[in-house]
Amino acid sequence: MSIVHAHTEEEKLKATTVRWRIFIIMLILGAINYIDRTSLSIAMPYITDEFGITDTRVVGVIHSAFFWAYALMQIPSGVIADKFKARNIIALATILWGAFQAIAALCHSIFTLSVSRLGLGIAESPIMPAGAKLMGTWLTPTERGRGSMLLDGGAPLGTALGAVIIAGLIALFDSWRMAFVVAGVGTMLVGLLAWWYIRTYPSEHPRINQAELDHIAVANGSATSSKKYRLADIKPYLKQRNVLALIGGWVCYSFVFYGLMTWLPLYFQATYGFDIKSMGGAMALIFLLCFVGQLTGGYIMDKWRSKGAKTSRVMHTMLAISATTAGVGIFLCAQSSTPAIAITLLTIALFPLRWASVYWSIPGLLGAQSVAGTICGTMNFTSNLFAAILPIFIGFLVQSTGNYYAAMMFFALAAVGYLVCSLLINFDKKMVVEEQ
């Protein structure tokens, strides 16, 4: 009897791991997010044939539709994340973007396809700001490196899986339209899963025990509400160097990641004559290892910091390695003449690139958790505004030069910008939170 009682007491003392399960769900949502985004890139060779598109500039315009909507909704989404419960925002957004993904299958013109991508961009926009709020309420400061990588890890994982899943569905049904329908319905089902399990605050979750609550509260306090901010509250933060460096670094990083995510399928097809299977395999390898690199980076950051290393040393070192490796790898890839070498160099380049995901945790690390949604929304708004222009710019570049060399040089140069901005972030100086 006493043995059973002792076992029960031990179970009570052992903290549950609800917070990590929530961020595993966020990882799944992020992956599905990018599967749906990447679906257009994978299907584009079929869409261009069906729609009779021969100009890469038109392809760029179609790709940019998503980013325009996604960008313009980032600041409103950040404010919404600061005002409303993250659980409600995440579940509703997931169901809506799944619907828009499926609706794209009904499109028979460039205009209607672009409109469906606008809807997808609007629906997906609240996920990252809401996720940043979850990270501040659920994870301790020494867990947020891993949390950032899980929150944003869906980008490379979804791009890798999307290359395989969408290509496989297209081959299975012999139709890009059916592939979009299946992907959209699957997304909506996962939205229901998110609603069932995620809670905005630890105290609201039925499966968390007191030990885990105490673990979170000791590091973060027991806050259960966020201060309400208006769009006008963004202005004071744009005067701070740390915020400007954060925005600039994220813009430059996004040029590299989104540029490669969007254009690699056509790059492989045009430069090396890849078919759908070869293209899907190459994309899957590159971005799957990018995902592995992202998780590895988050683990190293948290472990290094937990051993007492200064935040500035850890962050500057990791981000410098990330930017430098990406830039050099892409530069060398542009000089290569064989597909095997190109794939190898791109894999090396992208392995540490996603360490930039730690940007999502920086407002919280620098004392601005109460406005993390607004700051991260502004950061993501700016990067996606430029990302909306990027496909059009790259389309013109490729159309005018007849190859992808200049485009690859542009991505390498963007990596330099990512390096400079990351080193300009002063982790020893807190962000000033304006009182209203």
Image (cartoon, grey):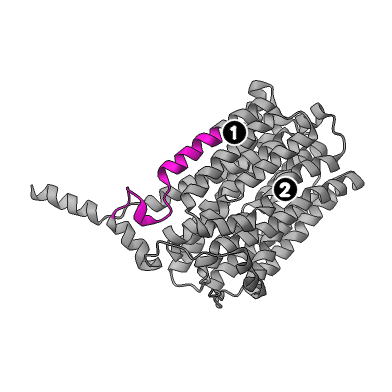
Residue 421 lies left or right of residue 140; in this view the side is right
Q: Residue at x 74, y 45 (%)?
A: 65
Name the image quarter holding the C terminus. Answer: bottom right
Q: CA distance from mark 1 to mark 2?
A: 24 Å
- Callout 1: SS: helix
Tell me if residue 136 is in the magenta stretch: no
Q: Nearer the viewer, residue 53 or 87?
A: 87
Q: Quadrant of residue 422?
A: bottom right
Given residues 79 and 248, the one toward you in this image is 79
Q: Is residue 226 left or right of residue 8?
A: right
| Residue at x 57% of width, y 48% of height | 291
- Where disc 2 sits, the SS reads helix
Query: Where's residue 286, x and y in %?
Result: 65, 44
Question: Around disc 1, counting alpha carbons within 10 Å, would you say few (fewer than 14), some (14 to 19), or many (20 or more)?
Answer: many
**Circle 2 crowding by C-alpha within 10 Å: few under 14, some 14–19, many from 20:** some
Dominant secondary-structure state across the stretch colored magenta: helix
Which residue, given by chain and number where applicable, does mark 2 sit on?
260
First in residue order: circle 1 vs circle 2? 1
Eyeballing the image, is 360 above or below 400?
Answer: below
User: Start and end of the magenta stretch?
Assistant: 186-209
| Residue at position x 32%, y 52% in the image | 208
Q: Nearer the viewer, residue 3 or 109?
A: 109
Please say if 314 is above or below 68: below
Residue located farthest toward the top when viewing the structure as drawn = 173
Q: Which mark is residue 184?
A: 1
Residue 374 location, x and y as percent?
58, 62
Where is residue 259? Give x, y as percent: 73, 50
Amino acid type, callout 2 = Leu
Q: Is residue 214 left or right of residue 3?
A: right
